[in-house]
Image (tube, rainbow, N blue to C red):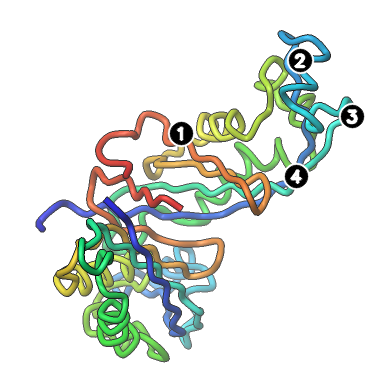
Amino acid sequence: MVLLTRKIEFAASHLYHNPNLSAAENRRIFGKCNNPHGHGHNYTLEVTVEGEPDPVTGMVLDLKALKEILEREIMQRMDHRHLNYEVAELAGKIPTCENIATVIWQLLEPKITQGRLHRVRLYESPDLFADCYRDGANGAVKS
Amino acid sequence: MSDALKIALGRRYRFSASHRLHSSRLSEEENYRVFGKCNNPHGHGHNYVVEVSVSGDVDPSTGMIANLADLDAFVERQVLEEFDHKSLNEDVPAFLDKVPTTENLCIEVYRRLKSFPHAKLERIRVQETGNNSFEYVGDNLEGDRS
């Protein structure tokens, strides 16, 4: 099996706020991420697809096809958007790295029909990221 | 396609420390042959990057596996306070009789963080320089590591 990873970047704003909690609890749990006017990040998304190279093309999947899927499903939905208010799949969820990575997995998994989605890694900053993968696959990516 | 999904949170931390690769079980010549310039008696240092991955259920009320403030405080107390700006050979008890290679450092960091109470420790990756890094997954090696 070969793993193929494509990286994209998008910029978006968000804030962490749970309406079921008091203002004081929101501040205690979410800290400065609870600022009511939000803040933003340059997100980096790494999408890893697993599969066997096609004997004719030598490809696990056509990178152009993957690029188009990422453009349509992720960039158009999330780039230069407010994740709390403009991304339907995140409505009612706190837009943490964990939740955004899970939504991205759910959006991409049915669209990737050559090979199979192996891992989604979403960086909110170089020092913070979330991985989403099948239980048992251990998130391992050969680098 | 209905496999259960796993979500892991990854966080990077940094510390700077010195070390010397030297085994008391080898002769001077053998130490130099095995460890080369890393055997220099006065040691040398690195800016280490430690990547900590924890997994668990995402709490629907917070959207989080674990609160970053809790993870940061735990790593600070268990690892960074005792490793940063220290000599690994002389200041960290585990390395008094163990060569402080980055392999062993990975295992020691894993051992110190395994008891994190709010999520399951999945993996420790330690980068010694921009060109080499090491990973330890403890007994989490079920399934396909590809």
Pointers 4 and 1 in contact (C-beta within 8 Å): no
**Given this view, does label 3 or label 2 mark the residue nearer the observer?**
2
State whether residue A30 is above or below residue A19.
Answer: above
Q: Are marks 4 and 1 on the same chain?
A: yes
User: How far, Cα to Cα, is label 4 from label 1?
Assistant: 24 Å
User: How far, Cα to Cα, is label 3 from label 2?
Assistant: 17 Å
Pointers 1 and 2 in contact (C-beta within 8 Å): no
User: Amino acid type of disc 1?
Assistant: Lys
Residue at left 64%, top 51%? B131
Chain bearing tag 2 is B
Which residue appears farthest toward the left when viewing the image? B2
Quadrant in the picture for residue A86: bottom left
Residue bearing mark 4 = B46
Residue A17: x and y in percent read 38, 75
User: Amino acid type of disc 3?
Assistant: His
State whether residue A55 is above or below residue B18.
Answer: below
Chain bearing tag 3 is B
Q: Are marks 1 and 2 on the same chain?
A: yes
State whether residue B103 is above or below residue A15.
Answer: above
- Counting every numbered tag in the picture gives 4
Pointers 3 and 1 in contact (C-beta within 8 Å): no
User: How far, Cα to Cα, is label 4 from label 2?
Assistant: 24 Å
